Amino acid sequence: MKSLISVFLFFFITTMAHGQMAHGFEIGANLMNADFTIDDEVIDTKNAVGPRAGYVGEFHLTQNLYLRGALLFMQKGFKFADETWALSSFDIPINFGSSFDLARDRLQWFLDGGISTEYNARAITKIDGETVELEIGNGEGELKSLSTGLNLGTGLQFARLLKFRVSYYTGLTNLINTEGADKWKNRYLAFSLNFLFRK
């Protein structure tokens, strides 16, 4: 995890020194679900809601092309019957994007996409109000500490300072260490506000 954060910080310190940079913070929520299979049975999962918040930075290659990175704490997971399964992670998404002027500098539409690397810090399941910790490690049946996924974001930017952002994420990694057919791959639809400050 420390090496991932170091790479992230190096990338943005370097870009801040050599180009136009916007940075700030993001706060929002994930409407989360998952593809979940246990003992060859596909579970009919339901949506749950989890928080997301953290630092965001954008390096502008041109007036309308940018690289976007973030270090976000968030929750992913799902509901099933009377159970809630939740995974808390630190995510580092790196996206390439473009913005399109709708009203000069007052309003833009943006679209970006890329890959996310995640450090999974804690996993729990809640059953009838009781919280059970899930093991994260390399053992059979334990959850993986590192995962990746693809994400796509779009929304509106106001005065190049405030963004209303809608993001979709689908996991590439099966979170369960197993040689069998068990599977847990997260996905979510996120709604967030980005507050940006320009260099």
Image: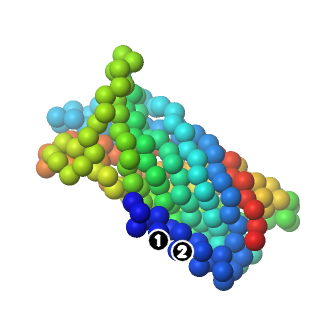
The reply to whether residue 143 is visible in this rendering is no
Which SS class for mark 2? helix
48 vs 163, left or right, is left
Task: Answer with left or right where residue 182 lies relative to residue 30.
Answer: left
Residue drawn at (55%, 44%) of the image:
52
Q: Which residue is mark 1?
A: 7
Q: Residue at x 28, y 50 (%)?
A: 144
Residue drawn at 54 percent across, 74 percent down: 11
Q: Indicate the secondary structure of the residue bearing disc 1.
A: helix
State the residue lying farthest toward the top. Answer: 128
Locate the N terminus by quadrant: bottom left
Q: Amino acid at mark 1?
A: Val
- Give residue 37's position: percent from left, percent from top: 25, 37
Q: Position of residue 58 (x, y in %)?
A: 65, 67
**Badge 1: residue crowd in 10 Å (few <14, some 14–19, many ≥20):** few
Q: Is residue 122 left or right of residue 28?
A: left
Percent x, y of residue 168: 52, 49
**Residue lying farthest to the front in this orientation:** 2
Quarter-wise, where is residue 143 in the image? top left
Q: Can you tell which quarter of the image residue 184 is in?
A: top left
Q: How many marks?
A: 2
The three-letter code of the residue at mark 2 reads: Phe
Residue 185 point in image, percent of width and height: 34, 46
Q: Residues within 10 Å of mark 2 (few under 14, many from 20)?
A: few
Based on the displayed image, in which of its 4 quarters is residue 162 positioned? bottom right
- Identify the residue at image location x=59%, y=63%: 112
Gap between marks 1 and 2, in whole Å?
A: 6 Å
Q: Are marks 1 and 2 in contact (CB under 8 Å)?
A: yes
Q: What residue would you read off at disc 2?
A: 11
Question: In the figure, 14 relative to 182: above or below?
Answer: below
> Which corner quadrant holds the C terminus?
bottom right
